[in-house]
Image (cartoon, grey):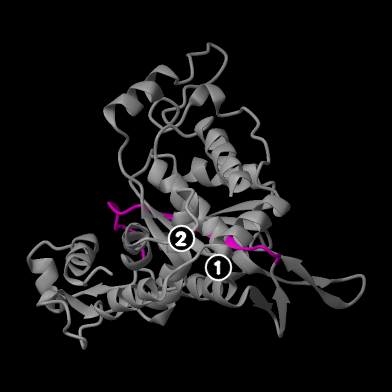
Amino acid sequence: MDSCMALVESFKKEMAKRVIGQHEMIDGLLAGLIAGGHVLLEGVPGLAKTLAVKSLAEITGLDFKRIQFTPDLLPADLTGTLVWEQASGNFSVRRGPIFANVILADEINRAPAKVQSALLEAMEEKQVTIGETSYALPNPFFVLATENPIEHEGTYSLPEAELDRFLMKLLVVYPKPVEELDIVKNSAPFSANAPFSANAPFSASSSKTRQEALSPVLNTEALKLLRNTADSIHIDEEINKYIVSIVTATRPVSKSTDGVYRYMSFGASPRASIALYRCCRIYAMLEGRTFVTPEDVKNAALPVLRHRIVLSYEAEAEGMDADAVIARILNHVPVP
């Protein structure tokens, strides 16, 4: 456990060179990396979502590709296509940017349904189909997607099936005043020879150290050690029942949450139970414990469930969001 905690601290230290604050986002990204699941980041522009993902890829030393999603994007722009070779008289495969270990799907909700379908196959099956042949994606393979919640022009709602493929959805919030003060003081100085960048002073990152190289402290061997340690974290049978009780309480047919069910049209699937089981063990490991407590389950419940429940019209009428509904569920489900 000591070696694992040293790796975790090294990871956080490296991330702090680029990103100021945003500790919940950083812990969530690390948890997703250890669990081998995809992560969705939601937040307004300028909160270092893209920078955090780029830094994560650099710290792991994995192959990284960024895909900027736009309404005119085609599936072939993502997966690749067949190219006719005049000299040989045959088609050859030109692989797209999806063939990388870490994929940054920037502004993922700007892509149309066909592109989302191509990404869905990659996320679930770890393969893509070009022509009549399916090609395996590199291992490991992570999709870290970002979306902006305040813009709706030219955007498409993500299908529920695709949302369910994300292990967690992390909400990236505004920095605290003391953190924003550090961001401002560490912003890049003016240069007479360089064009002014509007993003530099306002991004939730340290501009002076933005170009500083990060050490690949979470290489393949280190990541394997963290995963083996997470697998060894003890989880009591009562905690397992607690996890299942929380997930089943999100389903309106259960009617087990003292009226909270009226705020939900559809609940989470068993995939959510598996995700919560895996993530709470990782959260316990990040706290330096060898066993899972109910608090670990509660800490993991919000990022695991918030994108998996569909709210009813009654919830929207009363101004209830997914986090508020989940909080009510956690208050009603008996704690072991």
Q: Is residue 278 visible?
A: yes
Amino acid type indicated by mark 2: Phe
The answer to whether residue 27 is left or right of residue 230 is left
Residue on which disc 1 sits? 74
Q: Which residues are magenta?
A: 138-156
Q: Residue 272 in the image: x percent, y percent? A: 40, 74
Q: Of 190 and 33, which appears nearest the observer?
A: 33
Work out which residue is located at the far bottom of the displayed protein and give it.
Answer: 253
Q: Residue 208 in the image: x percent, y percent? A: 53, 21
- Element class at badge 1: loop
Quarter in which the C terminus is drawn: bottom left
For residue 328, which quarter of the picture? bottom left
Q: Of 171 and 110, which appears nearest the observer?
A: 171
Mark 2 or mark 1, which is nearer to you?
2
Magenta segment, prevailing SS (helix, strand or loop): loop
Residue on which disc 2 sits? 291
Which is more N-terminal, label 1 or label 2?
1
In this rendering, the answer to whether 303 lies above or below 135 is above
- Element class at badge 2: loop
Q: Residue at x 41, y 28 (%)?
A: 198
Q: Residue 1 in the image: x percent, y percent? A: 58, 50
Q: Of 334 and 87, which appears nearest the observer?
A: 334
Q: Is residue 145 visible?
A: no
Q: Residues within 10 Å of mark 1 (few under 14, many from 20)?
A: some
Q: Residue at x 48, y 71 (%)?
A: 116
Q: Residue at x 70, y 65 (%)?
A: 139
CA gap between label 2 and label 1 equals 46 Å
In this rendering, the answer to whether 279 lies above or below 177 is below
Q: Residue at x 52, y 32 (%)?
A: 18
Magenta stretch holds residue 139 = yes
Q: Residue 278 in the image: x percent, y percent? A: 48, 67
